[in-house]
Image (cartoon, rainbow, N blue to C red):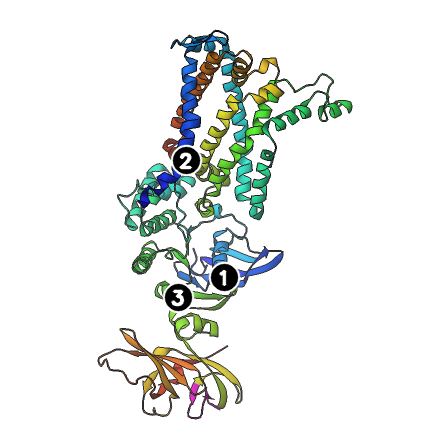
């Protein structure tokens, strides 16, 4: 009997996922294959025209979202890896303090943080307004409502999700293995490239996954920090659903995004996930 | 290379750490020389500074004071990757993402040795450590003993000037450890490289070493060959740390030529070589297996003490007696279980213990 205990304990979580994830997704899949409108009602037609139409109409935003998400992820990786490395190997006994600082922004709501970024980046806000007043920046300088602002917001909001998994992976690297590499004539750079980096790849993989997916689908940053030319796919879903009440189109876009992300992740996992990267590092 | 240049030379090496705002001296001034091809052990309890000393030889720590020389060249500030020394780590520290072959080839590849030569040398060393055929294994797929041999091969394949071993057998069980001791000694003879062996296990050090430096509290207490260390411990600490020792303390009664006559109790008379004046208190030591136990008074000219047998333990190849003297001092005596397996005395018997004067030593 006792060996079933873990399964019983996991049951509530499975039920939760079944009820609040699987059922709504199935419902949404069904909605995405209906036709009609809010007034006349929707009928299940199993027509895929919702998908073809949505892709035709919003491919620009879809591609833009993938580019924004991708660029933000690369920036987060470049910014986050050194931070994770520093906390794991150099922060000493203040490690937990730095980890706490990293999580501190989560005590403030995501939307609020993004809006406060909006204040910070405003053309005549405390930062740029002051700099313009001093004559450091030209009067027509602006960041808000540009691509830079949206990607910057994404980077700011999701950075901890990149740092934490990389930190966990680096933290697990035995310092003696690093010493062994130095002992075996490897330079610092070579030790990083052949020992530290490969051993931290599982963390990099998790970090990329945990940032690229939500950043690509995020509507808040584009809405608060972007202009009309920065609309992302998340904003389209929001508008179609809440403003136009076009539930089939909104559902179809959501599924298209999901499919694109899953395919992307699959390709990424095949390319970077496993053995071949480690084997390359061993040479 | 001239004969008289030592492989490794430490000159007044000191290592200080800052711990909780206080300066702690881990190594308080160690000077020693290790000859080419020597099997040299740093022996001591944990916290004695032996590992720090070794890490300074490897280059992982920079001495606060003093010099580290390799074949006469000052390498004190040379980083580990530029030192012709390799190390076998306590937990092996194998690269978990590489197989056996890649682990062993790592150093040669970093030194840009030609691929054909790498193939040759890795193959040869894997044969020496008996791992041929396991090249494709990952470390986690191997037993502790095998991982140990990979670690050894990974270091030796580079033909370093010296090999440092940090308690390399600590994680192995007793049988395997004894097997690896013999194995290590064989490999060292075969490759002819200087071995610096760090251990807290005195029997390991005694079995394998050409010379041993016994360390305590950041200093070398005694540096000598195993026989000398065991037979003639230079200090109370060494006597206590190596093997079983009986420590006695008494007053010098008279000086008879080179011998001191030390009195403990009324019928006790200990003769010990040493320098002291009558009336001085001296500490001395005698090994349990040097003592003869008998129920009759021994002949004159021997050291003799009288006591009562407390505990008698049968240990297979020998019997161990715990004999209490009149003043309460307990002396351990080993009696070889030779031809006649009977015991001389039982618990509660009064016995005489005797030994030759040259088998006891005064301690500083």
Query: Looking at the image, which is closer to me, A121 or A202?
Result: A121
- From the image, state whether disc 1 or disc 3 is nearer to you: 1
Check if mark 1's residue and mark 2's residue have beta carbons within 8 Å.
Answer: no
Extreme residue toward the right, this view: A134
Q: From this viewpoint, is residue B313 visible? A: yes
Q: Which mark is residue A12?
A: 2
Which quarter of the figure has residue B312? bottom left
Secondary structure state at the residue bearing disc 1: loop
Q: Secondary structure at mark 2?
A: helix
> Going from the N terminus, do you reach mark 1 or mark 3 first?
1
Question: Relative to B336, is B196 above or below?
Answer: above
For disc 1, the chain is B
Whether discs 3 and 2 lie on one chain: the answer is no
At a point 56% along the width and 13% down the height, the residue shown is A243
- In magenta, the rendered stretch is B254-271
Quarter of the N terminus of chain A within the rendering = top left
Same-subunit check for callouts 1 and 3: yes
Q: Position of residue A131 (x, y in %)?
A: 74, 25
| Crowd tier of the residue under label 1, counting other residues whose Cα lies within 10 Å: few below 14, some 14–19, many 20 or above | some
Query: Can you identify the residue that label 3 sits on?
Result: B202
> Under tag 3, what secondary structure?
helix
Decide: few, some or many residues near mark 2? Use Cα within 10 Å; few <14, some 14-19, many ≥20.
few
Disc 1 and disc 2: Cα gap in Å? 51 Å
Label 1 to label 3: alpha-carbon separation: 15 Å
Label 3: few (<14), some or many (≥20) within 10 Å?
many
- Looking at the rendered image, the quarter that the C terminus of chain A falls into is top left
Q: Which chain is indicated by disc 3?
A: B
Q: Quadrant location of residue B67?
A: bottom right
The residue under label 1 is B47
> Is A241 located above or below residue A136 in the figure?
above
């Amino acid at each position: 009997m006792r060996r079933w205990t873990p399964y019983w304990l996991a049951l509530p979580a499975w039920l939760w996922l079944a009820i609040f994830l699987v059922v709504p997704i199935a419902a949404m899949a069904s909605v995405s294959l209906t036709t009609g409108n809010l007034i006349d009602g929707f009928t299940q037609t199993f027509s895929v025209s919702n998908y073809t139409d949505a892709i035709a109409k919003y491919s620009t935003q879809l591609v833009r979202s993938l580019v924004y998400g991708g660029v933000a992820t690369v920036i987060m990786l470049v910014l986050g890896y050194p931070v994770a490395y520093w906390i794991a190997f150099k922060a000493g006994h203040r490690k937990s303090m730095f980890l706490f600082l990293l999580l501190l922004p989560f005590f403030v709501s995501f939307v609020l943080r993004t809006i406060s970024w909006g204040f910070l980046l405003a053309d005549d806000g405390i930062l740029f307004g002051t700099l313009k007043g001093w004559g450091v920046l030209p009067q027509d300088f602006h960041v808000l409502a540009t691509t830079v602002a949206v990607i910057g917001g994404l980077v700011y909001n999701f950075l901890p999700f990149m740092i934490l998994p990389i930190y966990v992976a680096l933290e697990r690297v035995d310092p003696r293995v690093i010493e062994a590499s130095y002992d075996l004539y490897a330079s610092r750079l070579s030790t990083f490239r052949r020992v530290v980096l490969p051993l931290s790849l599982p963390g990099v993989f998790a970090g990329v996954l945990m940032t690229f997916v939500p950043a690509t689908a995020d509507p808040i940053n584009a809405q608060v920090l972007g202009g009309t030319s920065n609309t992302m796919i998340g904003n389209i879903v929001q508008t179609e659903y809440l403003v136009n009440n076009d539930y089939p189109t909104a559902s179809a876009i959501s599924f298209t995004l999901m499919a694109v992300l899953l395919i992307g992740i699959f390709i990424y996992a095949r390319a970077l996930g496993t053995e071949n990267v480690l084997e390359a590092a061993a040479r | 290379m001239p004969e008289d240049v030592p492989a490794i030379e430490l000159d007044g090496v000191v290592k200080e750490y800052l711990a909780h705002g206080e300066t702690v001296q881990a190594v308080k001034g160690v000077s020693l020389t290790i000859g080419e091809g020597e099997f040299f052990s740093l022996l001591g309890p944990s916290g004695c500074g032996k590992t720090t000393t070794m890490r300074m030889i490897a280059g992982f720590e920079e001495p606060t004071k003093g010099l580290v020389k390799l074949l006469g060249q000052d390498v004190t500030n040379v980083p580990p990757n530029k030192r012709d020394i390799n190390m076998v780590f306590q937990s092996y520290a194998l690269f978990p993402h590489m197989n056996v072959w890649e682990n062993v080839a790592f150093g040669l590849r970093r030194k840009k040795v030609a691929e054909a030569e790498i193939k040759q040398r890795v193959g040869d060393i894997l044969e020496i450590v008996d791992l041929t055929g396991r090249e494709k294994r990952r470390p986690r797929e191997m037993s502790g003993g095998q991982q140990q041999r990979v670690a050894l091969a990974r270091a030796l394949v580079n033909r370093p000037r010296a090999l440092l071993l940090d308690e390399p057998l600590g994680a192995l069980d007793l049988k395997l450890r004894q097997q690896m001791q013999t194995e290590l000694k064989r490999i060292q003879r075969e490759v002819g490289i200087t071995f610096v062996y760090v251990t807290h296990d005195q029997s390991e050090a005694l079995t394998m070493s050409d010379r041993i430096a016994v360390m305590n509290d950041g200093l070398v207490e005694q540096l000598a060959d195993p026989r000398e260390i065991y037979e003639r411990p230079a200090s109370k600490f060494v006597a206590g740390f190596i093997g079983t020792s009986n420590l006695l303390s008494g007053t010098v009664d008279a000086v008879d030529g080179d011998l001191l006559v030390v009195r403990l109790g009324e019928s006790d008379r200990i003769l010990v070589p040493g320098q002291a004046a009558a009336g001085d208190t001296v500490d001395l030591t005698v090994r349990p297996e040097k003592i003869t136990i008998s129920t009759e008074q021994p002949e004159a000219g021997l050291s003799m003490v009288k006591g009562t047998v407390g505990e008698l333990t049968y240990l297979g190849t020998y019997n161990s007696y715990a004999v209490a003297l009149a003043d309460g001092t307990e002396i351990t005596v080993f009696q070889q279980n030779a031809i006649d397996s009977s015991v001389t005395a039982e618990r509660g018997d009064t016995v005489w213990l005797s030994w030759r004067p040259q088998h006891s030593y005064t301690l500083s």
